[in-house]
Amino acid sequence: MPAGRELTHVLAACPCHVRVMCLPTGMESEDDAILRLRSRAIPTMPTFPDLKSSLDGELSPGKGQQSSEDNHITSNGRIEVEHVISKKLQLKKKAEYLKSDLMRQFDTQVNDFMDSLIEESTSLEPAPVPAVFSPPMSDKERSKLRHFRPPHGEGKLFVSRRSLLDELFEVNHIRTIYHMFIALLILFILSTLVVDFIDEGRLVLEFDLLVYAFGQFPLVVCTWICMFLSVLFIPYTLFYLWAQSHSGSHSHLRLYSLLFGTLFLLYQALGLGFLPTYTVVTNSFPPASCFIIILEQVRLMMKAHSFVRENVPRVLAWCKEKNGPGPVVPQVSQYLYFLFAPTLIYRDKYPRNPVIRWGYVVSKLLQVLGCLFYAYYVFVRLCIPQFRSISLQLFDLRAMVLCVFNSILPGVLVLFLGFFAFLHCWLNAFAEMLRFADRMFYKDWWNSTSFANYYRTWNVVVHDWLYYYVYRDFLWISQKRCRPAAMLFVFTVSAVVHEYILAICFGFFYPVLFCLFMCFGMMFNFILHDKRKGPIWNIIMWTSLFLGQGVIICLYSQEWYAQRYCPLKEPSFFELLKPRSWSCERPDDRL
């Protein structure tokens, strides 16, 4: 049969909307060949059996004539209406899938590119941009950018960025993990209600543990107000007077510096250090109330130090250069904003958001409240029943091993709740109310393959303060000769402060956390260093972290109950240092 007549028969057997596909391969035009080559780059799509079988039948006219009944083709070459409709629906379905798949891939690639671009831009120092890309910045814009830089030398650069979890929760797969924790909270609540109903014959909704933990709350508020007002006026006044002494023609400037520096250190030690601790101990604050005062005490001491540390070099630089009418002294409003801002590094100005999203603030505060009740049910269902029974026994190795492994689950839950409630919800709520735009309070610490990276990313707020004011200042004093000693000093300061907080809030000295920091923390910092990469090191890090949480919950809970079951009438200094859980055996069933 001639080629033209064969082509005519082929096209007659095909509907008009698929006749291009019915052309034989050797007879396709140049445009059709290009279209066919481009179509090969399209991502793989799921097959549609009905469409494939129908198209195969049309691409092979001979086979279509031999199996006319299977393809629903009549003897005169006409296709039934139902078959045409089904093929059109299949083609429409295939086109919709192709469109959605291409849009999804394009959106993913754009998001990945923008995330990497933002990450790289935040890690670079701002540099002058060539005029070919953007117009030169005005003096006002340069002055505004200069406020976000450290006042002297190199330091932390604040930029506008969101918290990592806020970005991750936009992904449905990550948000499902958040939903799983909510479901677990619901199960804790249901189990507590069911057990109380079985034991008591009624629903018990008294929350005795929360009422006890946050006892004496009015006195807590009064103590905090006194602490805050003292930090607001005393450090600022001392710095202002010292700066004014350097702005005039006063002699004995070193004597003035020694005087005001001594007064500031005395205030830090006595006004912020001793008096709040004395108030907490003498009034026997319960644990949660005690944590509020002691944590605020440490936070305000760190902020006062940062304010002085960042502004003293500015005054000294002015005294050396005399490039203005007087030294730059921050305004009271700037210092007041810093006291509330969720950062421990002082700057005159921070990047700010244009508006306050009050719905976001309310949601974060509600999540903090939810985490508080979550922790309550964790202690009620997983901790208190276990440690009440363990306290009936003498301290031995078997009991301790069982206690540690049984405490891993509540310890991990408390770790997650503390991180989510404070570092994410609480700090983001205050940042939103203050329009504070730099929300990098933590990084992706869960991906760490080394403890060195975990220490840097778990709590960025505290890490920045330790890095700039402890580690770098130690290197500056030692002229960069003792980096291992500087690292050891940072670990020691962190361990001492953590142990001080727990000792005051729990009412006993049991240096478990100090030993974990100084022994295992230092060892893992050098063994699991930044050169360790790969999933196995992340597994090792998580295993060590889980085990450490179990040890902390187990030993501190045992000591808490031992202090109440076996009180000492006239303890000596050595007995106060000796853990009570090592020798305590409860003789009866008293609470």
Image (cartoon, grey):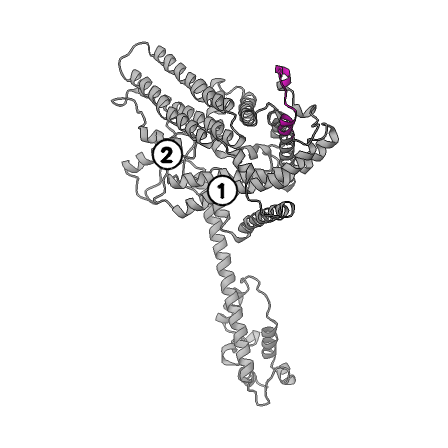
- At mark 2, the secondary structure is helix
Q: CA distance from mark 1 to mark 2?
A: 33 Å
Part of the protein shown in magenta:
558-575
Q: Which residue is mark 1?
A: 369
The first of marks 1 and 2 along the sequence is 2
Q: Amino acid at mark 1?
A: Leu
Q: Nearer the viewer, residue 424 or 276?
A: 276
**Dominant SS type (magenta):** helix
Q: Which residue corresponds to the image point at 40% horizontal and 26% vertical from the top-left?
A: 226
Residue 37 drawn at (x, y percent): 53, 65
Q: Is residue 475 magenta?
A: no
Q: Which mark is residue 148?
A: 2
Find residue 542 and name its label.
Answer: none
Q: Is residue 57 left or right of residue 359?
A: right
Q: Where, quadrant-wise, is the C terminus in this rendering?
A: top right
Q: Given this view, does label 1 or label 2 mark the residue nearer the observer?
A: 1
**Horizontal arrangement in the rendering, residue 138 relative to residue 119 (left or right):** left
User: Residue at horizontal 63%, vertical 36%?
Assistant: 384
Q: Is residue 57 above or below residue 494?
A: below
**What x and y, as percent, mark residue 112?**
49, 49
- Residue 572 in magenta stretch: yes
Dividing the picture into quarters, in which one does residue 199 lie?
top right
Residue toward you, 574 or 455: 574
Where disc 1 sits, the SS reads helix
Q: Badge 1 local density, few (<14 within 10 Å), some, or many (20+)?
A: some
User: In the displayed image of the protein, which residue is found farthest to the left?
Assistant: 325
